[in-house]
Amino acid sequence: MRLFIAVPVNEKNKLKIQEKVNPLKERYPLSWVRLENYHITLQFLGEVKPEDVEKIDSLLSEIGVSEPPFDLTLSSLDFFPSNTKHRAIIVSIKHNQEIMRLADAVREKMRYVDFVPDKVFNVHLTVARIKENQRNQKFTLMDNKIDSVLSVQSFSLIESILKKEGPVYTDINSYTLRGGL
């Protein structure tokens, strides 16, 4: 099973992001993320043995009990990893200690199933992927401010099934943040 752990994005924020993305879709033939697939990845796990899913589920449940809900500010559309090197168009998220703490807690728990993160956590929401043969093109992000608050009440363990028309995501379980309540 191909799994990742992510914070869901509510419909109000999905639509707000989509308002900014739609004009870009008309101008740039990129690999656009479908609206229903918007999320903020906390940790990509990759291929996981089915027998490990129960242990992962149990470990993630512990985080829900200890971590409190919090708010994130969705700032603007930007290029990732930088304005001069584009691999993706993302929604930047204002620096926030709570999301960093949640991501750290997830990464720490995943060590118990022998998962070692290979990248530094960089909080963002991907809206488009730029293919290698498109990376030398000039892209412009006009009217890119979003400035919307996302209330983070939960996170999810998600299965990703890759299909020709794009990935299909299925929640395996959702974990309500209840710490401090």
Image (cartoon, rainbow, N blue to C red):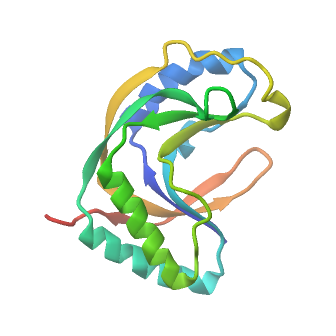
User: Relative to 121, is 140 above or below?
Assistant: above
Front in this rendered view, residue 121 or 31? 121
Tell me the quarter of the image containing the N terminus: bottom right
Horizontal side of residue 39 vs 154, given as left or right: right
Asked if residue 49 is positioned above or below residue 102 in the image, the reply reads below
Q: Is residue 158 toward the left or the right of residue 118 in the image?
A: left
Q: Quadrant of the C terminus?
A: bottom left
Q: Position of residue 101 (x, y in %)?
A: 34, 60
Q: How many marks?
A: 0
Pick the residue in front: 178 or 15: 178
Q: Quadrant of residue 154?
A: bottom left
Q: Is residue 55 above or below residue 134?
A: below
Q: In the rendered view, would you say 59 is above or below 118?
A: below
Position in image of residue 7 (x %, y %): 43, 53
Residue sitting at x 49%, y 13%? 143
Q: Residue furthest left?
A: 181
| Residue 110 located left or right of residue 83 | left
Q: Work out whether residue 54 can be spotted.
A: no
Q: Quadrant of residue 24?
A: top right
Q: Nearer the viewer, residue 63 or 165?
A: 63
x 65%, y 35%: residue:
88
Residue at 75%, 24% in the rendered image? 29
Horizontal and vertical percent position of residue 15: 44, 29
Is 88 positioned to the left or the right of 35 in the image? right
Q: Is residue 82 visible to us here?
A: yes
Please give the name of the residue rendered at 68% of the width and 51% of the height, measured from the top-left corner. 167
